[in-house]
Image (cartoon, rainbow, N blue to C red):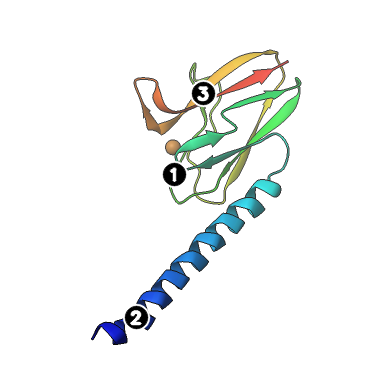
Amino acid sequence: MKTNSLPIVILTAFLLIVSISACTSTKNIKAASVPPNTVIMADTKFTPNVITVPRGTTVVWQNAEDRVHTATANDKSWNTGDMKIGERKGITFDKPGTYPYHCTHHTMLGVGMTGTVIVQ
Ligand SMILES: [Cu+2]
């Protein structure tokens, strides 16, 4: 019995290692292909969490996971609305300032999925 199950254990371990390395390389490709002034929505986080841009820049939010997210100004002055996986939406910032925002679906009492746009 034990001798027969050994190849299965080895095969399972091999497949596990292959799938882990596949995940790692996918992440690397994603990070390398992110355009400038883009905030990725993944793992229920905004990445980068704080983005600094010159005035007149269009910041693009890109949802990279299968959860609906929004980027919504805390003062409600701008809002991407609901975004599904693969969607990209841009907001143009003409006035210098600090713009804290959040996802309406994953924030409670100001804690959770939050970010900041700093316009210089
Ligand atoms: Cu969200």
Callout 1: SS: loop
Earlier in the chain: of badge 3 and badge 2, it is 2
- What residue do we see at 70% from left, 13% from top? 96
Q: Is residue 92 above or below residue 23?
A: above
**69 w.r.t. 86: above or below:** above
Question: Residue 51 at what x, y percent from top left?
Answer: 64, 26
The reply, left or right, for residue 41 in relation to residue 119 is left
| Residue at numbered disc 1 | 68
What residue is shown at x 61% (from left), y 39% (from top)? 89
Q: Residue furthest left?
A: 1
Identify residue type, mark 3.
Answer: Tyr
Left or right: 114, with 105 as reference point: right
Q: Which residue is mark 3?
A: 101
Ligand 1 contact, mark 1 (Cβ < 8 Å): yes
Q: Amino acid at mark 1?
A: Val
Specify few, some or many for label 3: CA neighbours under 10 Å numbering under 14, 14-19, or 20 or more.
Answer: many
The earlier-in-sequence mark between 2 and 1 is 2
Q: Which of the two residues, 21 or 103, is positioned nearer the viewer here?
A: 21
* Mark 1–mark 3 CB contact (< 8 Å): no
Which residue does the image show at 65% across and 18% down from the upper left?
118
Q: Quadrant of ligand 1?
A: top left
Residue 40 at x, y percent in the picture: 58, 40
What amino acid type is highlighted by mark number 2?
Answer: Leu
Which tag is nearer the camera, tag 3 or tag 2?
2
Q: CA distance from mark 3 to mark 2?
A: 53 Å
Whole-angstrom CA distance, mark 2 to mark 1, is 43 Å
Query: SS at mark 3?
Result: strand
**Dot 1 alpha-carbon crowd within 10 angstroms: few under 14, some 14 to 19, many 20 or more:** some
Q: Which residue is mark 2?
A: 6
SS for dot 2: helix
Looking at this view, is 4 or 15 the one in front? 4
The quarter of the picture where residue 95 lies is top right
